[in-house]
Image (tube, coloured by chain):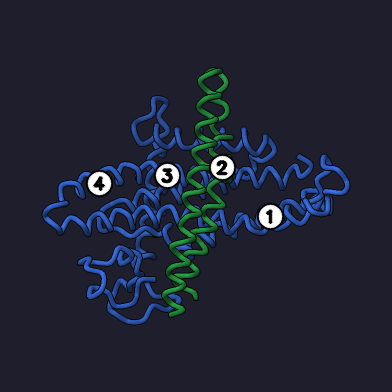
Amino acid sequence: MEGELAHIGAGLAAIGSGAAAIGVGNVAGNFLSGALRNPSAAAGQTATLFIGIAFAEALGIFSFLVALLLMFAV
Amino acid sequence: MATEAHGEEGGLVFHPMDQFIIKPLFGDGPVGLFTITNATLWMALTVLAVMALMVLGTSKRTTIPGRMQSVGELAYGFIYKMVEDVAGKDAVGFFPYIMTLFMFIVFANFLGLLPMSFTTTSHFAVTVLLALMVFFTVTIVGFVKNGSAFLGLFWVKSAPLALRPILAVIEIISYFVRPVSHSIRLAGNLMAGHAVIKVFAGFAAIAAVSPISVVAITAMYGLEVLVAFIQAYVFTILTCVYLKDALHPSH
């Protein structure tokens, strides 16, 4: 029984990756809308874009980690 | 992972996680600390590929670069500019380390995309080691360069005094969580992408959906080529960001 509950929990933790997808989309979309307003400044900011995406993604990774722990460690 | 019996309940011909099983290269014995496994083989191939590009490819040192030398120079210039821009001019001393990290990860990712190959960077054992090396380097460099002033990284001077203890707790947690997210980002992205390709490959056995499945595999493969590069890039750029924190803790 507990094994099944852990699997349900792992599935629920996958919602977190959807939330991370919203965050990453937000970062990329806002970057694009800013970049189209001032294209000449955009090239210098790609590093900032990737850092922002990486930080937004980190929290989705934690939900992935929770899912992994529930699947293989509990 | 994926060691339990499968086939009866799954319905897939192969398990999507089977590609990540570490097997000994010679014989069927148990995997010990010094057993030569498929992971060892592909890591060695990664190092050989990096050396082939960077040492053999640039050994002629022609003024007009050939194909290999152009790629080598492109990679060198790309990482050098990244270190200079993100981590600052005084971080250039760490360029060889960051260049090695980038070349190893990018080659491991791309070699893992070859059919029947083994993706070493999809294993947490590999990426956690890489991330911990970065973590300890950054911490030691921070304390050596700044002494106790490095702890100012956790004491945010620009915040109101009442908020600072709370922020300090959050900053300390986020500092120690860095190697976790740093390593799992790389391994998780690689593992998930390769597993998705295998899941679609499993559907190819059903005649009705096999055309869709082949198209999906092709599309995912294209995405994986992109991910392989971007994840190596993100790993390196985060290393540069952490290094900047260590060299200039007061922001």
- Quadrant of the drawing holding the N terminus of chain A: bottom left
- Of labels 2 and 4, earlier in sequence is 4
Label 3 chain ID = B
Which of the two labelled residues, at mark 3 and mark 2, occupies the earlier sequence position?
3
Looking at the image, tell me whether mark 3 or mark 4 is earlier in sequence order. 3
- The answer to the question of whether label 1 and label 3 lie on touching residues, with beta carbons closer than 8 A, is no
* Residue located beneath label 1 in the image: B175
Q: Dot 1 surroundings within 10 Å: few (below 14), some, or many (20 or more)?
A: some
Task: Look at discs 1 and 4 and give the one toward the viewer.
Answer: 4
Q: Give the Cα separation between the discs numbered 2 and 4.
A: 31 Å
Of B196 and B108, the residue lying toward us: B196
Tell me the kind of residue under disc 2.
Answer: Ile
Q: Residue at x 49, y 60 (%)?
A: A13
Between B246 and A46, the one lying in front of the other is: A46
Residue identified by numbered label 3? B55
Element type where label 3 sits in the image: helix
The location of residue B56, given as percent across then percent down, is: 38, 43
Q: Chain of mark 4?
A: B
Asked if marks 1 and 2 fall on the same chain, the answer is yes
Q: Position of residue B72 (x, y in %)?
A: 42, 37
Q: Colour of chain A?
A: green
Q: Which mark is residue B237?
A: 2
Q: Chain of mark 2?
A: B
Judge from the rendering whether residue A19 lies leftward or rightward of residue B144; answer left or right.
left
Front one among A1 and B120:
A1
Q: How many marks?
A: 4
Name which residue type carries label 1: Tyr
Looking at the picture, does residue A27 appear above or below residue B99?
above
Looking at the image, residue A48 sits to the left or right of residue B153; the answer is left
Q: Please identify the quarter of the rendering in which residue B26 is found.
A: bottom left
**Which chain did the image draw in blue?**
B
- Inter-mark Cα distance, 3 to 2: 24 Å
